[in-house]
Image (cartoon, rainbow, N blue to C red):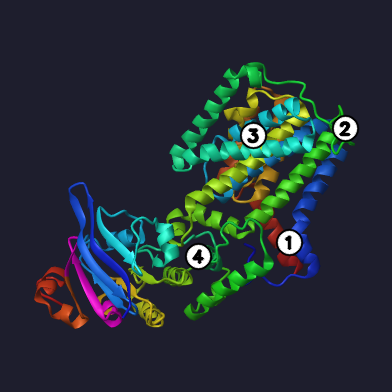
Amino acid sequence: MTERLRLKGLTKSFGGLVVASHIDLSLNEGDRAALIGPNGAGKTTLVNLISGALAPSGGDIHLDGARMNPFDQASRTRLGIVRTFQVSRLCRDLTVIENVCLPLIQRHRAAFRLWPSSRRDRAIQNEAATFLEPLGLADKAGRRVAELAYGEQRLVEIAVALALKPRVLLLDEPAAGVPASESGVILDLLSRLPGDLPILLIEHDMELVFRFARRVIVLVAGAILFEGTPTEVADNPQIREIYFGRAGH
Amino acid sequence: MVDIVTSPARTEPARWRAVVGPELAVVAVGLLAAIIFPDDLGFITRINILAIFTLSLALVVGQAGIGTLGQAALFGAGSYAAALWALHVTPEPLSGLLIGALAGAVVATGSGLLILRTRGLTLIMLSIAFAQVLLEIANKAAFVTGGDDGMADIPVNPIFGVVAFDFHSRVGFGYTLAALVAVYFCLRRLVASPFGLTCRGIKGDRLRMRAVGAPVFRHLLCVYALGGAVAGIAGALSAQTTQVVGLSNLDFELSAEGLVMLAIGGVGHLGGALLGVPAFMIVRHVTATINPNHWLLVIGLLLVVTVLYLPGGLYGVFDKWRRRTERSGS
């Protein structure tokens, strides 16, 4: 399997507070990995470090063998490190299709085109529609995002990420805020993502994690405590004690 | 971008109405005003100029979310540049407009490199500070700008060497109306472009836009420079039609009034600038005629009523009426 993403000794500290400590991690083509850990373990911080929202205090990030540290967040996104957010961060006053057009405009290098072109704009919007159809959002393309249910907003968020044609996808709690009864929709969507796309899923919903991931990474206090298959993680007494509580699940 | 996927297909006449309809409406209203009030062409010319200036605010504030109170610096830069161009190079007016636009864009780019790295209150304060610094430079550099006395008797040649500016502002009115229509047309196209959509995305959520790969700062700088060019055109028009440039062209009051006009008209739409400016100017003109000391109170009340009861401004009311009319017509 070709390696897409590699973290080498990634460290982040705010003064004396170390929030990520010498993290080594790699994601290969087609990887389905999940990052779990108790609240405050540093999961979102790790996503922020990889995506470029935060600058690391030490260590390296490599995508397809190229060092990503010098690149800012927007550049890393254009190179293929794509993330979603724990709390939906869509442009709420724009329509669904406009939100999906935004990454396409960047990908097609049309962001500084100052004059509309019905032919080229139509091509972008038609392409945006192709990302909405599989999610069942085609009929809501013209609705403002603020008018959508939260679960639907989470789906749009994933459509936006996919529109960027990611090399690596970092999903930060895609089911957060979605009723448990509807998290199956998210899982169904995740299972239909391109097979060669490496995905790092951060999630508190253990059912979702164990059904989605082939590899689970346990992060505690900014450091990787354990890495293994879902079964190995579930059977590890130390993780059961730290993460699931002394009594286990 | 114009929503092609979810909008119903348009017939050819409807498509043309969408392309140039608003500009034709501006021409029609402008001409009507000139016919009804032939003795107030100077006043209407001022409205045209301020409408262009407020369009620049509608672009940077309304579309890109750059909260600035220093737009007068860009207007003033355009005024002084056009005046100096006319005095020292050529009084040809169209080249003066270009120089005004260029000056506004250059000053906006220079100041934007600093102030656009900040947000919110800090950006507002820095934009005021920058405009005040520019005003003080213009004041001290009297050997170039005329200082406190400003520059008067700025020469302006006939437009295309044929149409000379007249005492009754007939040509000035037509010239500024043509400039307003051209600027409005270009800005409407700009807002409907991928660049415009990206600006609205940045206004909505900068972090989200970085996460879709948008170089946010470069976008903001670009839109701020474009807004500066538009404000510079307004400044140049002011210099050419009044033939006077003074420190008031850089004054904070102009920036603040522009924002109030935009708030009354509706911040989120370019059309807000076109409705807010005449509303503000007419109310001010009428109330100041009745009572020169208390017109500001009436403007204040108008602003409060707009903010509280018309969050979309006058354009929001107009837009609702238009949609209702379209629905009942279809």
* Amino acid type, label 1: Thr
Task: Return the x and y of residue B137 as percentages of the image width and height.
Answer: 56, 23
What chain is tagged by disc 3? Answer: B
Label of residue B325 in the image? 1
Q: Which of A165 and A178 is in front in this view?
A: A165
**Which circle, 2 or 1, is nearer the viewer?**
2
Residue displayed at 49% across by 80% down: A134
Q: Residues within 10 Å of mark 4 (few under 14, many from 20)?
A: many
Q: Magenta residues?
A: A208-225
Q: Which of B226 and B29 is in front in this view?
A: B226
Residue displayed at 69% across by 41% down: B52
Local SS, label 1: helix
Looking at the picture, does residue B242 appear above or below residue A208?
A: above
- Measured in 3D between alpha carbons, the distance from the residue under mark 3 to the one under mark 1, in whole angstroms, is 38 Å
Task: Return the x and y of residue A145 as percentages of the image width and height.
Answer: 50, 65
Task: Return the x and y of residue B262 as percentages of the image width and height.
Answer: 62, 42
Looking at the picture, does residue A46 appear above or below residue B263?
A: below
Label of residue A103 in the image? 4
Label of residue B164 in the image? 2
Q: In which quarter of the image is residue A80?
A: bottom left
Q: Mark 3 points at which residue?
A: B75
- Measured in 3D between alpha carbons, the distance from the residue under mark 2 to the one under mark 3, in whole angstroms, is 24 Å
Dot 3 or dot 1, earlier in sequence: 3
What chain is tagged by disc 1? Answer: B
Dot 2 or dot 1, earlier in sequence: 2
